[in-house]
Amino acid sequence: MQTELSSEAEEYVEAIYRLQKRSGVAKTKELAEELHVVPGSITNTIEHLEKHDLVKHEPYRGVRLTAKGEKLALDVLRRHRLAEKLLTDILNAEWSDVHEGACKLEHALTKDVIALLEKKLEHPRFCPHGNPIPTEYGEMEEECHPLTKIGLNEACIVAKITDEKRERLLTLANKGIKPCVPVHVVKRQKSSMILCVAGKECTLSYDAASSVWVKIVGRNKHAIQK
């Protein structure tokens, strides 16, 4: 039987998935920051998710999704990213504004509506920010690397932006950094990187650069820094 969860609980599962993909585990403080809540307020929800066998919580270490939790997270991500495509491709919303709206829409989209929406959008593979849209079976295309790990002067194209918050997207868009744009690292500095984005140089902080994932042109096996 499918687990019935509130919109808030689904948001938690999705946020845990994002943090787990980024850091290997979702720590309580990071989860609170991701969800814009105070750390003390998340205990009850985490306990609720544990009772449904969706997460495992290890004190002082953090929260990880179970196999059941990851399956649910991928379903929520699927709804979220298709909702973003609905907003940009059909309703002509701005690329930088759709994440927050999709967070609300995703919980209202039934399986039947998702099937109709996916057909209308001609079965898109990526959201407007370049992140892969899971199939109904939870499969995703993932063939890219963090920009922060790419070697100097290695030709790449931007594949996806993992932080979809409006402020981050506007920062990157102002520097010309969007999916499918050519980019390479010119120089690394103490707290920032000098990039060449579509032929123009710009400076980007490591924090912002950590949200940018790229595909290497020619797939040079020596291009990834350990």
Image: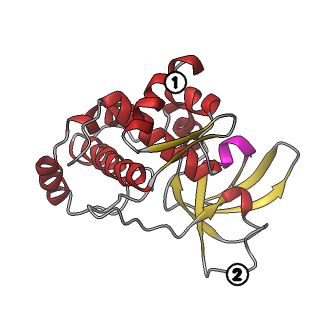
Q: Is residue 207 magenta?
A: yes
User: Total of numbered circles in the picture?
Assistant: 2
Percent of width and height locating residue 120: 14, 56
Compare residues 135 and 7 and report the one nearer the observer: 7
Residue 215 left/right relative to 196 = left
In front of the other: label 2 or label 1? Answer: 1
Q: Secondary structure at mark 1?
A: helix
- Whether residue 205 is visible to the viewer of this picture, yes or no, is no
Find the magenta span and give its range: 203-211
Callout 2–callout 1 Cβ contact below 8 Å: no
Image point 40% across, 65% down: which residue? 140
Tell me if residue 157 comes above or below residue 19 in the rendering: below
Q: Is residue 45 above or below residue 84?
A: above
Q: Residues within 10 Å of mark 1 (few under 14, many from 20)?
A: few
- Which secondary structure lies at badge 2? loop
Q: Which numbered marker is on residue 204?
A: none
Residue 156 seen anywhere in this rendered image of the structure: yes
Which is more N-terminal, label 1 or label 2?
1
Q: Amino acid at mark 2?
A: Lys
Q: Name the residue located 51 percent from the left edge and 18 percent from the top edge.
A: 41
- Residue 8 higher or lower than 207, as above or below: above
- Residue drawn at the location 66% of the way across and 42% of the way down: 208
Disc 1 designates what residue? Answer: 43
Specify the label residue 221 is tagged with.
2
In the image, 187 versus 73, the foreground residue is 73
Q: Residues within 10 Å of mark 2 (few under 14, many from 20)?
A: few
63 within the magenta span: no
Name the amino acid, label 1. Answer: Thr
3D distance between C-alphas at marks 2 and 1? 44 Å
Q: Position of residue 123 (x, y in %)?
A: 23, 63
